[in-house]
Amino acid sequence: MRIGVFDSGVGGLTVLRALAERIPGAEYLYLGDTARLPYGAKSRETVTRYATSSARFLVEQGAEFLVIACNTASALALDAIRAAVPVPVLGVVETGANAADASSQTRDVLVIATAATVESHAYAAACAERGLRAMEKACPLLVPLVEEGWIEHPVTAEVLHIYLSELTAQARIEALEPDTLVLGCTHYPLLRAQIERVAHESLQVIDSAQVTAQQVEQMLDGSLSRSEGAGPRFFATDSVMKFRALGSRFLGRGIDGVELVDLGG
Ligand code: DGL
């Protein structure tokens, strides 16, 4: 089984890592559309165009199942991606909402994500389908801070503090009693320790990487080999050097052999 994992950049490598640990028998193709990142500040039309061309590329390379690890592409373009490729497609908004559903006792959750994801209200809709109330907040400064490598940096801690206190104050005004905070962006798992330090201790912080891997395993049950697959193939649409340097932080190990691809503008 060849699984294609797509993200606008390197953040989706946290999902690839969880997949490879849980399903070592699959072969992986990972595409980071680094030339066209960030998706989170772009319109639905542009994100859809970029994400569908990226999905088609992975299928052309032999992917038999696609995981859209990018929250923004999952929120804005999942139906278009499904219509564009002849293979099953799983998005992380769905799996993130499943994780929130399993975690929340109060049935009120908070979601932080890119501006485009929040404007789409895809998380609120997916949560509502599961009987959860969700309050979403765009945190546009977090992706550039992570890209800059400012993980354990006082500026990042201050920015997180401002975003999270605004979000919890708003939740209080609307009489929500949240017990779960969903990290609705590929980059935020790298800030998890910081977020847990800043967020109220009653909040359970969840990211969709683990639950996505679990759901893929269930969906592919029966078609998975028990023996270990070949190592992943990596594709990037911009500097392979930058992909390797930044990507190893998300993947938790070194990356070599990144192939540069041109998917147009
Ligand atoms: N991958 C995007 C997401 O998960 C974050 C980076 C971007 O804006 O492209 O929403």
Image (spheres, rainbow, N blue to C red):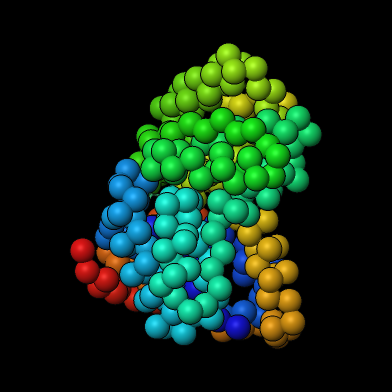
Q: Is residue 32 visible?
A: no
Q: Nearer the viewer, residue 62 or 135?
A: 135
How many numbered discs sit on the rendered protein? 0
Relative horizontal placement of residue 99, taking residue 146 as reference (left or right): right
**Is residue 50 among the parts visible in the rendering?**
yes
Give the side of residue 174 with respect to residue 247, left or right. Answer: right
Please, is residue 61 above or below residue 128 in the view? below
- Compared with 155, 33 (above or below) is below
Please identify the residue farthest to the top as the structure is shown.
173
Residue found 47% across the figure and 60% down from its top: 78
| Residue 190, horizontal then vertical, whole percent | 52, 45
Q: Quadrant of residue 84?
A: bottom left
Of residues 38 and 10, the one drawn nearer to the viewer in this rendering: 38
Locate residue 40, reporting x and y percent. 37, 46
Whole-percent x, y for residue 10 in the image: 43, 58
Q: Nearer the viewer, residue 65 or 190?
A: 65
Give the residue drawn at x 41%, y 63%. Answer: 80
Residue 230 spot, x, y in % from top left: 56, 84
Picture residue at 44% right of the left edge, 75% below the top? 85
In the picture, which quadrant includes the C terminus? bottom left
* Displayed quadrant of residue 194: top right
Placement of the N terminus among the 4 image quadrants: bottom right
Q: Residue furthest left?
A: 265
Residue found at x 48% / y 79%: 86
Q: Look at the picture and state if 75 lies above or below 90.
A: above
